[in-house]
């Protein structure tokens, strides 16, 4: 991988309308590191890789020489566990840049766990981490058999199965993504960056969410029926 040219970083910031401070926040690097790179001080290869990844995740690509341009791919596919990490990195960086919350729809809790690339005993890990970045609203058609409780910023509701498609769907920062996952298979993520597509998925989610029941209501009802039967 070729090193970044200072002109490329400056041009990328201009195209994204990012300040040095904003690029530093997205990458987790110091502002002085960005300033030094743009002044021609060659950074470590790992630092260049972090900056390159952040800019590419924002929709740009670097060309030969000193060029940078907008990437013409409204659809991106992330495959396998490395793809899982890249996908959730994109979720975090997109939400930090665009704002808003994260909406998730899945036919069952188990399917959502598989879409997150987790094991059943770590069912809340990724979603808990995301809830530290933005509010996470999760909608499932089947309530989880075992739910350890939701962290701050995480809400779980249930809806009818006929309202939910076969694939888990993530909606965030104007994007939407479908997750292909199953027992014994590594997850794949298809990310759609078209604003109209993201807007349609978000509106559909809001309509389902407003009619859905919080998990706490279902748990309380089940406990009430159990006491009445006893």
Image (cartoon, grey):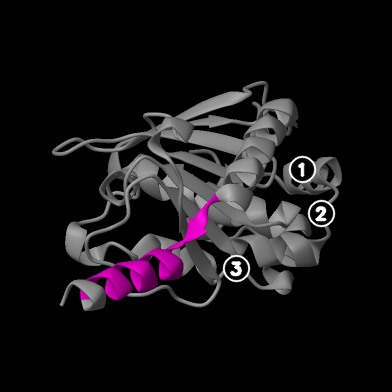
- Of pointers 3 and 2, the one earlier in the residue sequence: 2
Q: Which residue is mark 1?
A: 12
From the top left corner, tell me how far across and down residue 187 is, in percent: 30, 38
Q: Is residue 216 magenta?
A: yes
Q: Is residue 205 magenta?
A: no
From the top left corner, tell me how far across and down residue 206 is, in percent: 65, 45
Mark 2, other Cα within 10 Å: few <14 / some 14–19 / many ≥20: some
Query: Helix, strand, or loop for circle 3?
Result: loop
Check whether the beta carbons of the residues at disc 3 and disc 2 lie within 8 A of each other.
no
- Of pointers 1 and 2, the one earlier in the residue sequence: 1
From the top left corner, tell me how far across and down residue 171 is, in percent: 58, 43
Mark 1, other Cα within 10 Å: few <14 / some 14–19 / many ≥20: many
Highlighted range, magenta: 212-226
Residue at point 54% right, 72% down? 132
Q: CA distance from mark 3 to mark 2?
A: 14 Å
Q: Quadrant for residue 70, please give it.
A: top right
Viewer-closest of 166 and 162 = 162
Query: Helix, strand, or loop for circle 2?
Result: loop
Q: CA distance from mark 1 to mark 2?
A: 8 Å
- Of pointers 1 and 3, the one earlier in the residue sequence: 1
In the rendered image of this protein, does residue 64 appear above or below residue 146? above
Q: Which mark is residue 18?
A: 2
Mark 3, other Cα within 10 Å: few <14 / some 14–19 / many ≥20: few
Q: Which mark is residue 28?
A: 3
Check whether the beta carbons of the residues at disc 1 and disc 2 lie within 8 A of each other.
yes
């Amino acid at each position: 991988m070729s090193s970044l040219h200072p002109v490329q970083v400056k041009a990328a910031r201009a195209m994204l309308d990012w300040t040095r401070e904003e690029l530093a926040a997205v990458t987790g690097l110091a502002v002085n590191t960005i300033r030094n790179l743009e002044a021609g001080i060659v950074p470590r290869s790992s630092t260049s890789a972090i900056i390159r990844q952040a800019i590419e995740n924002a929709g740009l690509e670097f060309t030969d020489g000193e060029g940078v341009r907008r990437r013409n791919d409204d659809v991106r596919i992330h495959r396998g566990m490395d793809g899982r990490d890249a996908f959730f990195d994109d979720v975090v960086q997109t939400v930090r840049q665009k704002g808003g919350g994260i909406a998730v729809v899945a036919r069952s809790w188990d399917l959502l766990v598989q879409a997150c690339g987790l094991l059943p005993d770590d069912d809340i890990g990724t979603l808990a981490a995301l809830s530290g970045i933005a509010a996470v609203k999760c909608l499932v058609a089947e309530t989880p058999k075992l739910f350890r409780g939701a962290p701050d910023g995480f809400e779980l509701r249930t809806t009818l199965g006929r309202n939910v498609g076969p694939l888990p769907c993530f909606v965030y920062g104007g994007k939407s993504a479908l997750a292909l996952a199953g027992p014994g298979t590594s997850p794949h993520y298809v990310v759609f960056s078209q604003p109209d597509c993201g807007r349609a998925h978000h509106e559909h989610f809001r309509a389902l969410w407003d009619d859905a029941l919080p998990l706490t209501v279902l748990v309380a009802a089940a406990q009430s029926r159990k006491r009445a039967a006893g």
